[in-house]
Image (cartoon, rainbow, N blue to C red):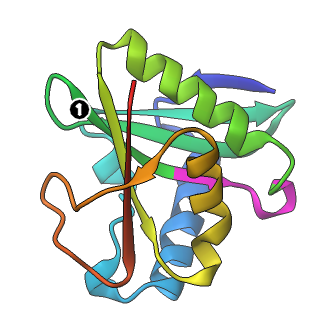
C-alpha cells in the first residue's frame, strides 16, 4: 500500500469522498453531520492523504489545521470491502506522524456516537485517543463523540 498526499483532482477520490459524505448523511442527522465535502477538503488548512493498493483507492484521511498547535483528523474512510484489513491503522499512524512533523502537539477528532461508529472509536482508542469535550467550533451533541491525544 502507498500513502500519498492527494490533490483532490481525480474522479476516483471525488467519488470515494462523495460516498463517504452520503454514508455519513444516511447514518447521522443533518445537524450532526460534520464530514467535509470535496470543496471543504480543498481548503488550504486541510491536507488529505489517499491510500492506494496497486491501482485501487482503499482509504483516505485528512488533517485540518485548527491553530499552530492543534489539528483535527477528518474524513477517515476505508473502502468497505477493505475494512478491518489494516488500512485505517496504517493511515492513522501515517497521519499522526505527519501531524508531529508539521509541529502540532495535539490531534483531535469528532466521530459518531452510535454503534455503527464503534469500530472507529476503538481504533482511535488503540492509538491513544481519549474522549474529550467538544473542541474548536463543535457544540455538545448526543450524536457525536469527541476524542483527542497529545503528540
Total of numbered circles in the picture?
1
For the C terminus, the image quarter is: top left
x then y, percent, for residue 79: 74, 56
What residue is drawn where x is 66% and y is 25%? 3
Q: Which residues are magenta?
A: 76-82
Asked whether, in this view, residue 91 is left or right of residue 75, the answer is right
Q: Nearer the viewer, residue 3 or 32?
A: 32
Estimate how packed mark 1 is, as few (under 14), some (14 to 19) or many (20 or more) residues with alpha carbons within 10 Å: some
x then y, percent, for residue 5: 52, 24
80 part of magenta stretch: yes
Using the rendered image of the protein, determine whether residue 5 is visible from the camera's viewpoint: no
Q: Nearer the viewer, residue 150 or 141?
A: 150
Asked whether, in this view, residue 150 is left or right of residue 66, the answer is right
For the N terminus, the image quarter is: top right
Asked whether, in this view, residue 90 is left or right of residue 22, the answer is right
Q: Nearer the viewer, residue 110 or 2?
A: 110
x then y, percent, for residue 58: 75, 45
Helix, strand or loop for disc 1: strand
Q: Nearer the viewer, residue 39 or 146?
A: 146
Using the rendered image of the protein, determine whether residue 2 is visible from the camera's viewpoint: yes
x then y, percent, for residue 129: 47, 45
What residue is drawn where x is 60% and y is 22%? 4
Q: 30 above or below 56? A: below
Q: Image quarter for residue 35? A: bottom left
21 part of magenta stretch: no
Residue marked by disc 1: 70
Amino acid at each position: 500500500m502507498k500513502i500519498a498526499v492527494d490533490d483532490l483532482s481525480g474522479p476516483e477520490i471525488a467519488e470515494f469522498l462523495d460516498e463517504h459524505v452520503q454514508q455519513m448523511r444516511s447514518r447521522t442527522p443533518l445537524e450532526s453531520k460534520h464530514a467535509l465535502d470535496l470543496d471543504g477538503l480543498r481548503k488550504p488548512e486541510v491536507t488529505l492523504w489517499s491510500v492506494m493498493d496497486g491501482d485501487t483507492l482503499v482509504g483516505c484521511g485528512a488533517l485540518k489545521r485548527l491553530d499552530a498547535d492543534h489539528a483535527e483528523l477528518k474524513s477517515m474512510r476505508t473502502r468497505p470491502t477493505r475494512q478491518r484489513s489494516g488500512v485505517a491503522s496504517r493511515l492513522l499512524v501515517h497521519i499522526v506522524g505527519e501531524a508531529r512533523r508539521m509541529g502540532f502537539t495535539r490531534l483531535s477528532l469528532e466521530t459518531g456516537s452510535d454503534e455503527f461508529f464503534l469500530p472507529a472509536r476503538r481504533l482511535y482508542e488503540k492509538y491513544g485517543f481519549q474522549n474529550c469535550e467538544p473542541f474548536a467550533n463543535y457544540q455538545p451533541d448526543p450524536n457525536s463523540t469527541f476524542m483527542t491525544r497529545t503528540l
